[in-house]
């Protein structure tokens, strides 16, 4: 199991310290929640902060674009050096084209799905995807309660991936903690995004190791 701490739950007044600490504690990726205030009712951060993080830390960056026009961000994020990009199925008219653009830049391409969006919506292009991000909360804010419906979606997606794209990774974001992590693993999750569960701990290595060693 790979663990991707969501930096949205870190202390932004002492961000460098928090990220140094979480990386030293065993994080596999840093999850970047990019929100525009249109697709979701919140604003977070953009290029300047992501550039600083890339310059300072040598760890894969996982950009989750909760924005209305994700195609505008892809070339710049590629230039910065982001390794993973997920775009929301609900925001893109020409999904296959945007996935191909992400892959053209050498970035792992993923589709993010809101809780109410069926996983079958990605089946037509599942062979082109590197990962799918299953939202287990409604996107826009950290600290929300996990929605169990995500477990059924993960299992359905895992079964289809076994048939059409066995290398597909399944990432889960929203309310992830030790009470649901084992169920997520059994359903087929490969990457767990956790924010408040990790950053609320005194020692970040404790929740990270608990999630990794289910």
Image (cartoon, helix red, strand yellow):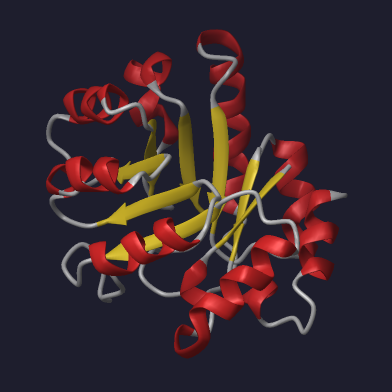
Q: Could you tell me if residue 61 is visible in this image?
A: yes
Q: Position of residue 201 (x, y in %)?
A: 74, 81
**Residue 52: which quarter of the image?**
bottom left
Tally of marks:
0
Report whether 140 appears left or right of 154: left
Q: Could you tell me if residue 143 is visible in this image?
A: no
Q: Nearer the viewer, residue 134 or 118?
A: 134
**Quick check: 60 above or below 55?**
above
At a point 22% along the width and 42% down the height, the residue shown is: 74
Residue extending farthest front: 55
Q: Position of residue 143 (x, y in %)?
A: 54, 77
**Quick check: 99 above or below 197?**
above
**Residue 140: which quarter of the image?**
bottom left
Q: Nearer the viewer, residue 118 or 26?
A: 26
Q: Position of residue 122 (x, y in %)?
A: 36, 27
At a point 20% along the width and 30% down the height, the residue shown is: 98
At a point 12% along the width and 35% down the height, the residue shown is: 93
**Residue 17: which quarter of the image?**
bottom right
**Quick check: 168 above or below 50?**
above
Report whether 63 appears left or right of 90: right
Q: Nearer the viewer, residue 43 or 52?
A: 52
Quadrant including the N terminus: top right
Q: Position of residue 79 (x, y in %)?
A: 25, 43
Residue extending farthest top: 163
**Quick check: 200 above or below 32?**
below
At a point 46% along the width and 50% down the height, the residue shown is: 61
Q: Nearer the viewer, residue 18 or 9?
A: 18
């Amino acid at each position: 199991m790979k663990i991707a701490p969501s930096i949205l739950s870190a202390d932004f007044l002492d961000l460098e310290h928090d990220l140094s600490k979480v990386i030293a504690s065993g994080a596999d990726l840093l999850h970047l929640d990019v929100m525009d205030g249109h697709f979701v009712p919140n604003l977070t951060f953009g290029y300047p902060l992501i550039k600083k993080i890339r310059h300072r830390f040598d760890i894969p960056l996982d950009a989750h674009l909760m924005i209305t026009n994700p195609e505008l961000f892809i070339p710049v994020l590629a230039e910065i050096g982001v390794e993973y990009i997920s775009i929301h199925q609900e925001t893109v008219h020409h999904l296959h084209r945007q996935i191909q653009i992400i892959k053209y830049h050498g970035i792992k391409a993923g589709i993010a799905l809101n809780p109410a969006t069926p996983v079958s919506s990605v089946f037509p292009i599942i062979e082109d995807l590197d990962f799918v991000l299953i939202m287990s909360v409604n996107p826009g804010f950290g600290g929300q309660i996990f929605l169990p419906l995500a477990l059924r979606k993960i299992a359905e997606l895992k079964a289809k991936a076994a048939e059409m794209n066995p290398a597909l990774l399944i990432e889960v974001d929203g309310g992830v903690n030790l009470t649901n992590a084992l169920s997520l693993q059994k359903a087929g999750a490969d990457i767990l995004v956790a924010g408040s569960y990790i950053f609320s701990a005194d020692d970040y290595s404790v929740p990270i190791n608990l999630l990794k060693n289910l």
